[in-house]
Amino acid sequence: MHLVIVTGLSGAGKTQALRYLEDMDYFCVDNLPTQLLPKFAEVGQAAGLDRVAVVMDVRSGNLMGDLYEVLYSLKDYGCTYEIVFFEADEDVLIKRYKETRRAHPLQKQGELVNQAIEQERRMLSPLRDNANRIVDTSDYTLKELRSSLERIFGQKAGAGQLAVTVMSFGFKYGVPQEADLIFDVRFLSNPFYIDSLRAHTGREKAVREYVMDLPMTKPFLDKYIEILRMVMPGYVNEGKNQLVIAIGCTGGQHRSVVIAEAIYAALKEDGALVSITHRDMGNDMKR
């Protein structure tokens, strides 16, 4: 039995992700208490369940205190597992809570939602650091979230389709093993050395404008996107249905994020089945 542990920040899309996993024939359970996981694995194995997904988060009791010991015991039941951590930018989470008019599970009376979000982020930081996958849903539509999960968990794109993921990353954190195409954009001037931009990311207007206004950026993007448009049909003809395009800079905060977003926007405008993820964005800011 293979177990997918869906965890992460409240409001980042875990419940919706569980619904999509259920559509992909996973047996799904929401809000499973940590201490029940070994028994659940035992029963699932005996029942012949093959693919199982559970949501475990701050609602699940002493998550951080018990989880690693519990996970270690899963091997006794012949169960493999992976941890998928869902997150989103603080302003996106706040907006989602305002739209749903729901309280954050950690929010106390008289406390602002951003305080609860920050508390949860700190609590789950060790779990995030040990996750097998991190899914940032800040810019995802529901359709894009579904497409991303279908790519991750093996549901193929339709006949004649190529499911494309554009990923930004930082070379200092290692090259992504799942990448099919890797491009190094460290030839562009680094906003890190601009005092007013250092603490910001490539999603923010000031950094985006700085990178996009560099003399080499537009010519590079025009040529690289032209190459992608040329080779993508070839991949489909050869039977490939998933393509991961990784764009790297030093820390994965500025240049790679801007370039990845530009590539994503161009392919999306073309009608491609495309999603985007920023693997390392925010890592440097936490140091």
Image (cartoon, grey):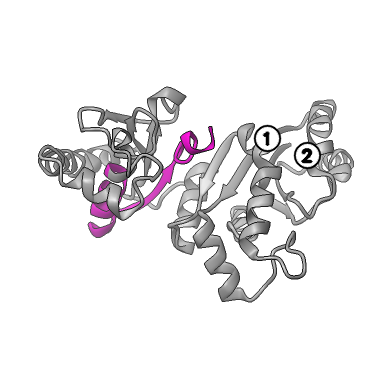
Residue 60 part of the magenta-drawn span? no
Q: Quadrant of residue 51?
A: top right
Marks 1 and 2: in contact by CB < 8 Å? Answer: yes
In the picture, measured across the screen, residue 237 lies left or right of residue 76, that is left
Instruction: Measuring from the top left, give residue 21's x and y in whole percent.
Output: 61, 53
- The residue under label 2 is which amino acid type? Met
The residue indicated by pointer 1 is 126
Q: Which type of secondary structure does the marked residue at label 1 adopt?
A: helix
Q: Nearer the viewer, residue 272 or 119?
A: 119
In the picture, measured across the screen, residue 142 lies left or right of residue 106, that is left
Classify 10 Å Cα crowding around label 2: few (below 14), some (14-19), many (20 and above): some
Q: Quadrant of residue 143?
A: bottom left
Instruction: Measuring from the top left, give residue 80's x and y in whole percent.
Output: 71, 31
Q: State whether residue 12 is above or below residue 251.
A: below
Q: Which type of secondary structure does the marked residue at label 2 adopt?
A: helix
Q: Nearer the viewer, residue 284 or 99?
A: 284
Q: Quadrant of residue 248?
A: top left
Q: Nearer the viewer, residue 160 or 188?
A: 188
Residue 283 part of the magenta-drawn span? yes
